Amino acid sequence: MESSFPFINQALLITDQPLKTFHHFLVASACVLITIFGYYFFKPRCIIYLIDFSCYQPPDFLRAPVSNFIEHLTISGVFDQESLDLQQKVLERSGISDDASVPASVHEIPPNASLPATREETHEILFTIVEDLFAKHEIGPKSIDILVSNCSLFCPSPSITSMIINRFGMRSDIKSFSLSGMGCSAGILSVNLVKDLMKIHGDSLALVLSMEAVSPNGYRGKSKSMLIANTIFRMGGAAILLSNRKQDMHKAKYKLQHLIRTHVGSDNESYESVMQQVDEEGKVGVALSKQLVRVASKALKINVVELGPRVLPSSEQLKYIVSFIQRKWGIHKEIYTPNFKKAFEHFCIHAGGRAIIEGVEKHLKLDKKDVEASRSTLYRYGNTSSSSLWYELQYLESKGRMKKGDKVWQIGFGSGFKANSAVWKCISEIDSRDRNAWSDRIHLYPVCGDASSELRTELLS
């Protein structure tokens, strides 16, 4: 029934209009929020599977025993006695065995650092491991959708990925990327690049190639900080096959859980800790600063702060928070170091040198067995740069320690300075009898005490 006062009816009509508009606004907003919620929480996740990987195993004739290494340096006539003594001292304390290898060009006197020699080294390593990986899984080169290579100090034209495309006859629409200058942590960076690309490109198969060329990077000067690099880098490389295809889930070895990148290059000390430069005599080399271990520890600490909440059980996180508060109040001096063995069964620490491995072992309060894969990789293969993490993972497989459901934490360090972490979960049964870069001598590891002489005896026999 309408009011007998027309102006009241008009007022009610005017008041009702904004209410209807507001109601429509609320309904529309709710629909938008529900749509956004549904998109982000129910959209298909991009899962990265690691189907398999292959590591390069140099032939025995490329081994570089310490005595031969020093003899070659002496005969070359490049170094003075002080430089020779320093390199011999570092070699003997490096934790690298006589089993580690260098390319044929470095066995020449004087070492051949030419472009053709470096190409030959790159071909030998990458062609071998790619052929091995393709043959093992009966994969045709044209099935590869994404190709990423990383080699820090060798950046030829055509690129390394072009070498692979040309050699194996890959498709013309392949998405290829060649990374350089990114140091020993570039292997994880390459996986991260593939991960981002696969968010856009569904049902894709990716090949990642990690190596460092030894041939062109020998330093021939007198700077102590630049001579160290001559003694620790050795020949090696890895090929990693990744996929986001559902059909590959059942044949994949691992699934990527987390990938965290940390770059502390804004700090000068960190930025200059590993740097390619020219000495006073105009000779080029890579300088390693005395602060390198401290810089790595600082970068790792930042990386762990971001990774920890994603992987640690709540009990460990609570202990850390309580200790942090107690330190602020002056109750305790030290902050509690979380027990990462409650989050991971295995650890792969970049085999950059004894000091790096021991520094991470101390920082994370790990046991000797936790870093066994890293020490064994350094001992047998030396510092193979970005590929060292894959030799370590292969070591764990060969030892029969990797079980379905286990998680492994890969920790990479590189110039810049960078600390990167990748967490993988084993999703299949790993057969320790599968042939790989460790199969021939895995029974001799880990090396300790008299075992080192046993290994040398077998190598010489």
Image (cartoon, helix red, strand yellow):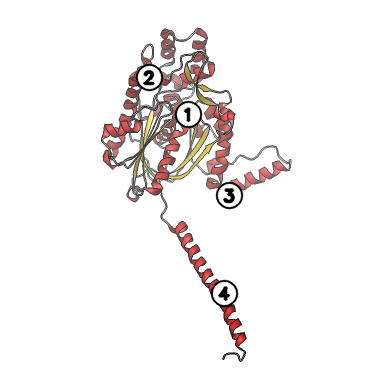
Location of residue 188 in the rendering, given as x and y in whole percent from the top left corner: 45, 37
Say which residue label 4 marks.
Answer: 18
State which quadrant residue 266 falls in: top right
Query: Is tag 3's residue or tag 4's residue first in the polypeptide sequence?
Result: 4
Crowding around mark 1 (Cα neighbors within 10 Å: few <14, some 14 to 19, many 20+) is many
Q: Is residue 292 visible?
A: yes
Q: Mark on residue 63?
A: 2
Amino acid type of the residue that numbered disc 3 sits on in the rendered structure: Ser
Amino acid type of the residue that numbered disc 2 sits on in the rendered structure: Arg
Who is closer to the viewer here, 296 or 364? 296
Query: Residue lying farthest right?
Result: 330
Amino acid type of the residue that numbered disc 4 sits on in the rendered structure: Pro
CA gap between label 4 and label 1 equals 69 Å
Say which residue label 3 marks.
Answer: 314
Query: Is tag 1's residue or tag 2's residue first in the polypeptide sequence?
Result: 2
Query: Is tag 4's residue or tag 1's residue first in the polypeptide sequence?
Result: 4
Amino acid type of the residue that numbered disc 1 sits on in the rendered structure: Ala
Describe the element under mark 2 as helix, strand or loop: loop
Crowding around mark 4 (Cα neighbors within 10 Å: few <14, some 14 to 19, many 20+) is few
